[in-house]
Amino acid sequence: MSVLIDDPIWPAHGRLWAHLVSDSSLDELHAFARTNGLPPRSFDRDHYDVPEEALPRLIAAGAEHVGGKELVRRLVASGLRVTARERRG
């Protein structure tokens, strides 16, 4: 059971953003996010959007830093991935 974070490569709102996911449960993900002060509004169906400057703090708190492909691979394997089709409705 791990909380994973990828590289901040997604631009939005004048910043770069990373994704924070769990490879086992949304409960684990939400608990980690709450403990580390991430606002509920940053949750997007299967991940939290995390600003670049939060990475060192979240990694120090136990998030495993992985590449984007590894993050998606492990999210899919967990069964928690929300597909583009599911997002559309």
Image (spheres, rainbow, N blue to C red):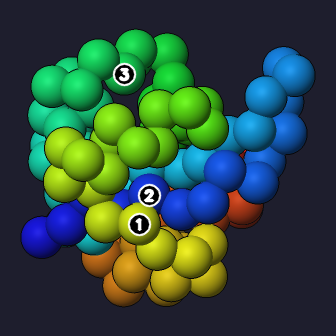
Q: Secondary structure at mark 3?
A: loop
Q: Disc number at residue 38?
A: 3
Quarter of the image for residue 85 reads bottom right
Of circles 3 and 1, which is in front?
1
Asked if disc 1 and disc 2 are in contact, CB closer than 8 Å, the reply is yes
Residue 26 visible in the shown view:
no
Q: Secondary structure at mark 2?
A: strand
Above or below residue 80? Residue 67 is below
**Amino acid bearing label 1:** His
Q: Disc number at residue 2?
A: none
Quarter of the image for residue 68 reads bottom right
**Amino acid bearing label 3:** Leu
The residues bearing labels 1 and 2 have C-alpha atoms spaced at a distance of 5 Å
Q: Nearer the viewer, residue 16 or 86?
A: 16
Q: Give the residue at mark 2.
A: 5
The residues bearing labels 3 and 2 have C-alpha atoms spaced at a distance of 13 Å
Where does the C terminus fall, quadrant-wise?
A: top right
Q: Nearer the viewer, residue 81 or 71?
A: 71
Residue 41 visible in the shown view:
yes
Q: Earlier in the sequence, mark 3 or mark 1?
A: 3
Q: Give the residue at mark 1.
A: 65
Q: Earlier in the sequence, mark 1 or mark 2?
A: 2
The residue positioned 84% from the left and 20% from the top of the image is 13
Q: Secondary structure at mark 1?
A: strand
- Crowding at dot 3, Cα within 10 Å, few <14 / some 14-19 / many 20+, comes out as some
- Crowding at dot 2, Cα within 10 Å, few <14 / some 14-19 / many 20+, comes out as many
Query: Position of 43 compared to 12: left or right?
Result: left
**Amino acid bearing label 2:** Ile
